[in-house]
């Protein structure tokens, strides 16, 4: 499973990239706005921090505008993936940009039928929002499993990118359900290493080492 970090904070991205544990980055206009810098400048810097895909989202809502913005974003760096909403216009723009060789991440997916349409439109990634489904008492993991089965049935190349991940359990369940990618905030990635028994075991080891006066 690939890990993408969902942020526009270049310091966090650089720190995680240095570990070799992340495979790409997802962003959105709101995250980039927090940086207080020009949109294209931030995207370009992020693209230089990872060789993996960097999802950069359009703000237009019509197909023509999405294609125009998508082409500009794709010129920023070779590893830009244009992020489009799962609307009728978004699907039309996805087909156009995909046919031109641009990777497209279709976002705001909440149903298996939507994911099927995105794959048929040539999307490189489909982003089901599991956390938001959980918020309305629906099972986000059931959606991941349904998409996995449909894509496997018809041999679609579109990668399932589990988004709106909020907890370490979301990561585990997404992996079990067959998601190709999980994108999450830096805090969630870092929390995956935590376990109380690991901490307890380390404390016991250090105490024993101190008693035995072990030095390396």
Image: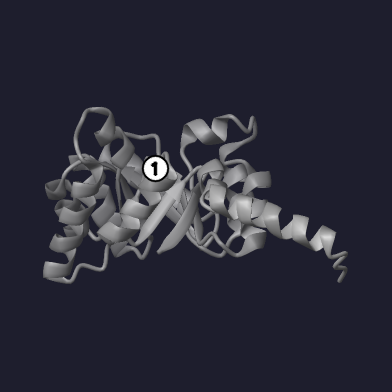
**Residue 133: percent from left, percent from top:** 25, 35
> Does 58 appear above or below 192?
above
Quarter of the figure with the N terminus: bottom left
Residue drawn at x 55%, y 47% as measured from the top left: 196
Name the image quarter holding residue 214.
bottom right
Which part of the image, by quadrant, shows the C terminus?
bottom right
Image quarter of residue 108: top left
Disc 1 element: loop
- In this picture, residue 199 sits left or right of residue 166: right
Instruction: Looking at the picture, tell me which residue is in the foreground, 157 or 167.
Output: 167
Q: Nearer the viewer, residue 156 or 18?
A: 18
> Visible in this render: residue 161?
no
Q: Residue furthest front?
A: 211
Q: Position of residue 73 (x, y in %)?
A: 48, 49
> Residue drawn 62% across and 56% down?
201
Residue 165 seen: yes
Count all numbered tags in the image, as a single digit.
1
Badge 1: how crowded within 10 Å, few (<14), some, or many (20+)? many
Q: Is residue 121 above or below residue 167?
A: below
Q: Position of residue 37 (x, y in %)?
A: 64, 34
**Disc 1: which residue:** 165
- 100 or 50, which is in the foreground? 50
Residue name at image x 61 percent, y 43 percent: 42
**Residue closer to the observer: 54 or 139:** 139
Please give the name of the residue rendered at 12% of the width and 48% of the height, measured from the top-left corner. Answer: 113
44 vs 211, left or right, is left
* Location of residue 1 with respect to 13 vertically, above or below: below
Percent from the top left, x then y, of residue 9?
Answer: 62, 41
How is this picture coloured? Answer: one colour
């Amino acid at each position: 499973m690939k890990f993408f970090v969902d942020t526009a904070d270049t310091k966090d991205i650089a720190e995680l990239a240095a570990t070799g544990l992340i495979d790409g980055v997802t962003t959105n206009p709101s995250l980039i706005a927090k940086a207080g810098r020009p949109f294209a400048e931030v995207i370009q810097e992020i693209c230089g921090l990872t060789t993996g895909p960097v999802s950069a989202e359009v703000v237009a809502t019509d197909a023509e505008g999405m294609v125009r913005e998508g082409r500009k974003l794709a010129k920023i760096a070779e590893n830009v993936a244009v992020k489009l909403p799962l609307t009728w216009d978004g699907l039309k723009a996805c087909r156009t940009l995909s046919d031109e060789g641009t990777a497209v991440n279709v976002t705001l997916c909440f149903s298996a039928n939507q994911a099927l349409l995105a794959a048929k439109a040539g999307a490189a990634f489909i982003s089901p929002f599991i956390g938001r489904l959980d918020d309305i008492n629906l099972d986000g993991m059931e959606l991941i499993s349904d998409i996995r089965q449909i894509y496997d049935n018809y041999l679609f190349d579109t990668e399932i990118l589990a988004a709106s991940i909020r907890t370490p359990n979301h990561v585990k369940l997404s992996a079990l359900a067959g998601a190709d990618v999980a994108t999450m905030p830096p805090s969630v990635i870092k929390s995956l290493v935590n376990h109380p028994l690991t901490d307890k075991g380390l404390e016991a080891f250090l105490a024993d080492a101190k008693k035995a006066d072990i030095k390396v």
